Amino acid sequence: MTKEQFHILLKAKHIITEQAQDALLYLQSCEIKEALIGHVSFHRSAFEERNYKISTLIAKSLAKYLPLVDDDVDTATIYLVMTFEAMFQKQYGEVLNLFQQFKSLEVIDQKLNINFDLLMFHIFAEFKLFAKCRFFAENIMRNPYIYNISIPEITHFYSICTLLCYENNDANYMSYCYQEMKKIVDGNFNEETRDIGRQDKQIVEILQGLLNAKTKEEEQLFLANYKQISACYIEYPTTIVSKNYEIDYHILHRFMVFKDYDFIVSRATYFLKLASSIRMKTWFQELKTQALKEMKHKDYLSNLERLCKMQAKNEKELSFYIKDAYVSSYNTIDLHDGIVRLQKQYEYDELTRAYSRNILYQRAKDMFIRNKTATILFMDIDNLKEVNDHYSHQAGDEYLKLFVQTLKSIMPIDAQIFRYGGDEFVMLLPGDDEQTIRAMLQKLQDKFTLSQNILSQSIMVRYSVGIACYPRHGRDIQEVLSCADYKMYEAKRNHRGRHILSETSLVQ
């Protein structure tokens, strides 16, 4: 391959492996400095066109130059390409190691600094470590090279900043991030990218409005605006950054409050086609399934089965990433406390201190293997929305905490309770002794015969329960859980209130 042919290849949208190998052979024949520049340009071109197989080949070839370079900036540039690849492969531990090696070089280069800070920001955003994200976000916003970052990438960055603020109820910092985003988007005169920035800005404006809304009427105005935007939503092509639809997920979740289930199903289905990560697909599938359940739709059970499979796959993937990041980051960049906190966030529901759904599938699998028989109780709070609406969301939070505390006080020592969703809980216990289970549920019913004092309000605790046993009602956790959920739904539909189960759910 000649130099001219190589530069033509850089502009190609589709590159086959043989072409890439020829190009790398050409680069290996060049002087080291020219070879480095060529590798970096080739990698950027392949990555932006989503030729990920080719970009990985290029990164591996470039890594071989590390022992040959004696300039710290060149070394840092190679680290950056390797970090992009590790980030794409979700090898988070390797990302942290490469960042540490870059920092040890003490290179003063604004472009390299902002690129590494962006990568670190994204890895901590992935695990919702708000304080760490804010540290890197402020570094990025102070970096003058921020105005040279592409509009899709920088609006993606600000969108995540505002999303984290929303999740942490930090209205002041959210406003600051939005104003900084607005300055960059409004000051952009590139017609090709201007509409991308404006669309991202509109979505962020709605999220900010929902956080600051004082009344339901205000909230409905922002949701109506989101509907208008959705009607003309354009899926713009992205470059280095994969589109994050998590803001859309949070906005759609607010439509649940107003029971706009048809719109939720429609938009969730749309985003299921666009979302690239299994975790995001799981979120939208969960939202869609919940809406179908409320609609009593015939497709509810098939979507529940699809959701269970996604959740199992998501749990396995996330567990691997946590282990990878923990092992590789320990004693390297002082992330031990953050990773430990991440592990706790992964395993426990922060509000109720029940186990999180993240570990339900593995715990159930272990129990099935160890005990040969097991029982799943699927519990749904019947009146949480009414408590939130009539009293406050704080009262609703206390209601959930009281429910879990009461469950823990009466359940067997070897049972485990998981928060499955907003108002749904799953209890997992070994064995399938009907008398033991009925006795426990009778204790629970006795506890909630009278109204409870919650934030000085007298509130009745109402719930429905469905029960299924392994292996009697299913060969694996998905089948048993689906059966228990169906039985709970049946109990709720027939006897809304504090009812335990349909008569056949346990004895069949």
Image (tube, rainbow, N blue to C red):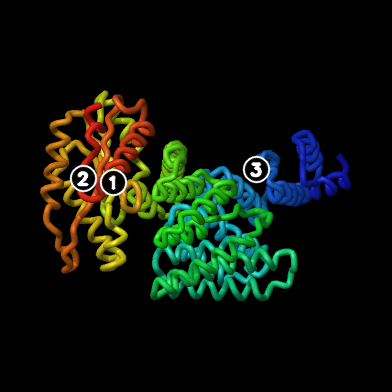
Q: Earlier in the sequence, mark 1 or mark 3?
A: 3
Mark 3 element type: helix
As measured in the structure, the alpha-carbon distance from the residue carrying label 1 to the one carrying label 3 is 60 Å
Q: From what the image shows, is residue 1 above or below residue 231?
A: above
Q: Is 388 or 31 nearer to us in this picture? A: 388
Q: In this image, 407 relative to 238: left or right?
A: left
Whether pointer 1 and pointer 3 mark residues with C-beta atoms closer than 8 Å, the reply is: no
- Tell me the residue that label 2 is attached to: 499
As measured in the structure, the alpha-carbon distance from the residue carrying label 2 to the one carrying label 1 is 8 Å
The kind of residue on which mark 2 rests is: His
Q: Earlier in the sequence, mark 2 or mark 1?
A: 1
Number of the front mark, 1 or 3? 1
Image location (x, y in percent) of residue 251? 48, 61
Residue ID at (54%, 67%): 204
Image location (x, y in percent) of residue 499? 21, 45
- Tell me the residue that label 3 is attached to: 63
Residue 492's disc number: 1
Q: From what the image shows, is residue 351 above or below residue 59?
A: below
Residue ID at (12%, 52%): 449
Q: Residues within 10 Å of mark 1 (few under 14, many from 20)?
A: many
Q: Which of marks 2 and 3 is nearer the N terminus?
A: 3
Image location (x, y in percent) of residue 455? 19, 67
The kind of residue on which mark 3 rests is: Ala
Q: In this image, 433 relative to 357: left or right?
A: left
Whether pointer 2 and pointer 1 mark residues with C-beta atoms closer than 8 Å, the reply is: yes
Mark 2 element type: loop
